[in-house]
Image (cartoon, rainbow, N blue to C red):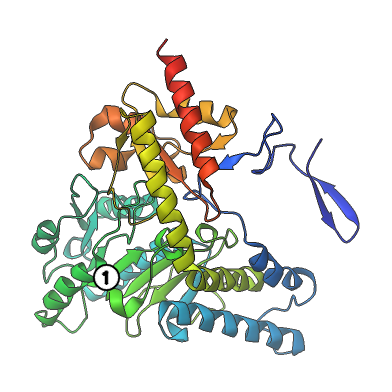
Amino acid sequence: MKNVFFAKGRKFPILSIPMHTKSTSHTKRIYFDAAATTPVDGRVFAAMEPLFCNAFGNPGSIHVEGVAAKEMMSRARKTCADVLHAHADEIVFTSGGTESNNMAIMGVTMQALKDHEGDYSKIHVVTSSIEHASVLEVCKELEGRGVRVTYVPVDEDGRIMMDAVKRAVTRETTLVSVMLANNEIGTAQSIADIAKHIRKVRKGNKEAHAYPYFHTDAAQAAMWCDVYVEKLGVDLVSVDGHKIYGPKGVGLLYMRRGTKLFPLLFGGGQEGDMRAGTESVPLVVGLAKALELAESERIQNVSHITGLRTYFLSRLRAELPEAELNGDSAGGMVNIVNISLLDMDSDFLVISLDERGIACASKSACHSNDDSSYVVAAIGKGREAAASSLRFSMLKDAKKKDVDRVVAALVEIVEQNRR
């Protein structure tokens, strides 16, 4: 039977695909791919729902409906700013993490290009070898235009090498972009320490601008880590709604006051002239609610999932001792467990687990066309480990019985494959 969406007494049939709570065998499905996306929290949906059909005004209009929409945008902006410990005018709403990352990197670069009279070769960007595709692909594009890009390596746990950062970041550097926590292996970076070095370099820079700027992609981290911009010491932060139980299609870019970015979109001057286009009030309100909930419930969520991750790892060590853990064993992103089973193909494992009602991933969903995980390869595990890696990323309400089913299914698949 097809799934049906109900709205005011009408029924709209949609794709006849089992929802994440059901499987074809009528057993409860286990969704361990939260790093790819999360379901919208019911409280988030409740905050958004009236804004689609009832309070639907355009924030740019001066009539009652428009003023009400503008007020909702203002409240949402303040909520997001409060969570980040920022000012409301430092929040720019975007379509998600990818746009936020592009806006930060391209925006800084295009602004710097004006300062350097159009000479791309005078622009220098520093990033890490394990960034999200929406950072690495932008850097590759800029390299093609003549920008100098330094890719700082990471150690075997996925931590960026500080000595390499100190060698790479100089007075000629325009931008440093390092993610707060990795989306595949979960390792968190010492963003505050990197920021300290950048401030030292900036103090020694006698140019009129404030380069190098520092950007961090916090799309994955915002659910599980404090993203307090002053403590981090960053100039730019990316946040994505659908990674934190909010809606898809919305995110934000934090821009520290005084940070100069060239806009990617031109038009009506919305978002402080940084992003033209009519704002999606329901999505923005949903993002603010999701971010507020992530902040207020973080301690209990982290405590629960940290214990569950420890249990998960202990079960794997006992039942599948040949499984190699990828990333920091302590875990920055406490909901992520990434392993390699060296003689197994990761896509085969994902499909086999899916047939057993378990959703996981072999790598980032944004690199689904690649053969293996470039992140696992970058931490020195080699091609075989990268091609046999599995990422389990747990939802905040995951349970021990879910872990037990996952481990039992893995053991069954491995044993069947080795007969």
Residue 19 to residue 199: above or below: above
* Residue occupying image coordinates x 32% and y 59%: 179
Query: In screen coordinates, is 89 left or right of 329?
Result: right
Q: Quadrant of the N terminus?
A: top right
Decide if residue 260 is in sight here. no
Q: Where is residue 119 in the image (x, y as percent from the top left)?
A: 21, 65
Task: Give the image quarter of residue 338.
Answer: top left
- Apparent side of residue 27 relative to residue 92 in the rendered image (left or right): right
**Amino acid type indicated by mark 1:** Phe
Measured as percent of width and height from the top left, residue 390 is found at 40, 36
- Which residue is the extreme one toward the top? 419
Numbered circles on residues, count: 1
Residue located 51% across and 69% down the image: 297
Q: What element carries label 1?
A: strand
Q: Residues within 10 Å of mark 1 (few under 14, many from 20)?
A: many
**Residue 46 percent coordinates (x, y):** 71, 68
Residue at 41% across / 40% down in the picture?
391
Q: Is residue 239 among what the camera can see? A: yes
Q: Quadrant of residue 253?
A: bottom left
Q: Name the residue under label 1.
A: 214
**107 or 241, which lies in front?**
241
Q: In which quarter of the image is the C terminus?
A: top left
Q: Position of residue 296 (x, y in %)?
A: 51, 73
Left or right of 220 on screen, residue 290: right
